Amino acid sequence: MSDWYGPMSRVSAAVAAGLPPTAQEGSRRVATRPRRPWVVAGLLALISVAPLSRAAEPDHDEALRLRQAGQILPLQEVVARVVSQSPGRILEVELERAGDDYVYEVEILEPGGTLRRLWLDARTAQPTEPPGGDHR
């Protein structure tokens, strides 16, 4: 047992951590919570469905094709506009499909520590509504 817990036994440390004790106070065995198979099944279901939800976002090849066709602005141009108009650090930029149009979602960490999201029309870099009302 580490010195962080001081003179507590393993069971006392488990109780202090919110785990149920399994034996008497002097026991060397630490309690664990029972496994829940439905949690594992739920996580596996989410993992298997996750790729389907991302299919709506264009991949690199499609973004390149859209840029070459003039249907979206180059990422460098969008980033330059955001940097010139918004203080803070850009953390992430994603190209998202919004019906027949495309939107850049930009995450900015403002100087005060606030995370801000902008949605910009991919053709004009003008502010727009999030696709599907996505206000996360």
Image (cartoon, rainbow, N blue to C red):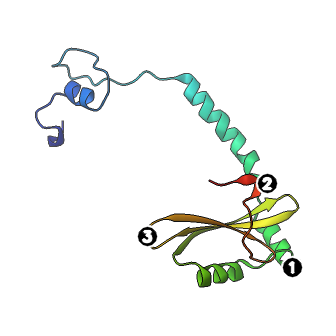
> Which is closer to the viewer, label 3 or label 1?
3
Horizontal placement of 14 versus 95: left or right? left
4 versus 17 height, above or below: below
Circle on res. 9: none
Q: Residue at x 70, y 78 (%)?
A: 78
Q: Which residue is mark 3?
A: 112
Q: Identify the secondary structure beneath mark 1.
A: loop
Q: Nearer the N terminus, badge 1 or badge 2?
A: 2
Q: Identify the secondary structure beneath mark 3.
A: loop
List x then y, in percent, for residue 33: 39, 24
Horizontal placement of 118 versus 126: left or right? left
Q: Nearer the N terminus, badge 2 or badge 3?
A: 2
Q: Are marks 1 and 2 in contact (CB under 8 Å)?
A: no
Q: Residue at x 79, y 69 (%)?
A: 63
The answer to which quarter of the image holds residue 91 is: bottom right
Q: Residue at x 87, y 79 (%)?
A: 70
Q: CA distance from mark 3 to mark 1?
A: 36 Å
Q: Which residue is mark 2?
A: 56
Q: Which residue is mark 1?
A: 70
